[in-house]
Image (spheres, rainbow, N blue to C red):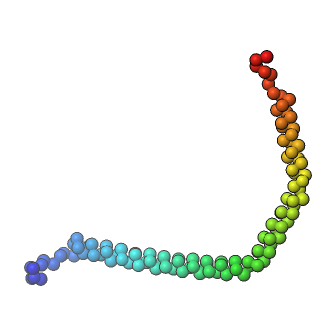
Amino acid sequence: MTEENITPEPEGGFFSDLLDKAKDFGEKAKDFAEDAFDAAKDFTEDAVEAVKDFAEDLPENAKKLADDTTAAVKDFAEDLPENAKKLADEAKSAVSHLVDDKPADPQA
């Protein structure tokens, strides 16, 4: 086929419309890619800043966490004998009620 045999497509023909839609899609894809890149860049910058802040506060936060844990363990240890005795008394009471309230022997 030579160019002489090709009939020019009228304005607004199928291929022209297809080409216009492809160009439009390409523009939208380019805009989307730019927005995605900007969002990823912003996210990365924010993440780096958050890690820096966390690292700067780490010694202070670690000490606070250790102090809070120490206080909680100390309180638990102080209350342990009292709580253990209370638990044992409740268990003893529950068993006593089971033994005292046992149903009558059905064969009697």
Image vertical order of residue 26 relative to residue 82, above or below: below
Residue 98 position by quadrant: top right
Image vertical order of residue 94 relative to residue 23, above or below: above
45 sits to left or right of 28: right
Residue 104 position by quadrant: top right
42 sits to left or right of 81: left
Quadrant the N terminus occupies: bottom left
Quadrant the C terminus occupies: top right
In percent of the image, x 70 and y 80: which residue is there?
A: 55
Position in image of residue 48 (x %, y %)? 62, 80
In percent of the image, x 83 and y 36: which residue is there?
A: 95
Position in image of residue 80 (x %, y %)? 87, 55
In percent of the image, x 12 and y 83: which residue is there?
A: 3
- Residue lying farthest to the front in this orientation: 107
Residue 66 position by quadrant: bottom right
13 sits to left or right of 40: left
- Residue lying farthest to the top in this orientation: 108
- In front of the other: 25 or 11: 25
- In front of the other: 6 or 96: 96
- In front of the other: 24 or 68: 68
Position in image of residue 18 (x %, y %)? 27, 72
In percent of the image, x 74 and y 79: which residue is there?
A: 57
- How many numbered discs sit on the rendered protein? 0
